[in-house]
């Protein structure tokens, strides 16, 4: 995870997600286990991860994150095979970019308007 600079790894079987190991899981294991380096991915993973399809829209992702109370969701294709992962951070960053662009339109169409500088 450190080498790839990621906060989670999806564990697959036949290309289908069967679990997920997160940086939080690893951190907790370090504090609770005598020899955390000896643990396997199977021992550390949360099984049966919630997933989303590749065509899930941003609003539905936000709802899904709220329902599942997780920060990362594996993305699967129609056959249930892993295609990637989406994080709550990804969603927030994308929304922030979109809001910034919307703010530019408002400022351009509203002469004299400027948001409060805080």
Image (tube, rainbow, N blue to C red):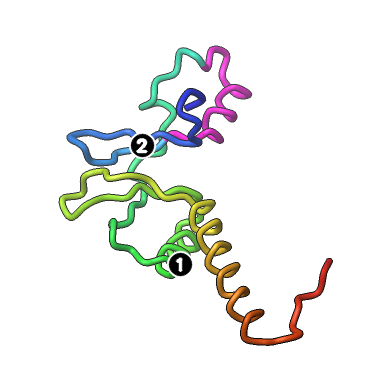
As drawn, is 114 to the left or to the right of 18?
A: right
Q: Residues within 10 Å of mark 2 (few under 14, many from 20)?
A: many
Q: Position of residue 9 (x, y in %)?
A: 40, 34
> In the rendered structure, which segment of residues is drawn in magenta?
21-36
The quadrant in which the C terminus is found is bottom right
In the rendered view, tell whether residue 85 sits above or below residue 65.
above
Question: Which SS class for mark 2?
Answer: strand
Of 66 and 57, the residue lying toward us: 57
Question: Which SS class for mark 1?
Answer: helix
Q: Provide the residue designation for mark 1.
A: 63
Q: Residue at the location (48% across, 23% down)?
A: 3
Q: Position of residue 85 (x, y in %)?
A: 38, 46
Q: Residue at the location (45% across, 57% down)?
A: 68
Q: Provide the residue designation for mark 2.
A: 10
Q: Main secondary structure of the magenta part?
A: helix
Would you say residue 97 sits in the magenta stretch? Answer: no
């Amino acid at each position: 995870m450190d080498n790839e600079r990621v906060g989670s790894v999806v564990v697959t079987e036949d290309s289908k997600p069967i679990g997920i190991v997160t940086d939080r899981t690893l951190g907790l294991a370090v504090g609770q286990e005598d020899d955390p380096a000896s643990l396997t991915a199977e021992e550390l993973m949360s099984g049966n991860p919630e997933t989303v399809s590749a065509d899930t829209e941003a609003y539905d992702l936000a709802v899904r994150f709220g329902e599942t109370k997780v920060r990362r969701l594996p993305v699967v294709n129609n056959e249930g095979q892993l295609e990637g992962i989406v994080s709550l951070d990804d969603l927030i960053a994308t929304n922030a970019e979109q809001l910034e662009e919307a703010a530019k339109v408002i400022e351009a169409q509203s002469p004299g308007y400027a948001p409060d500088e805080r």
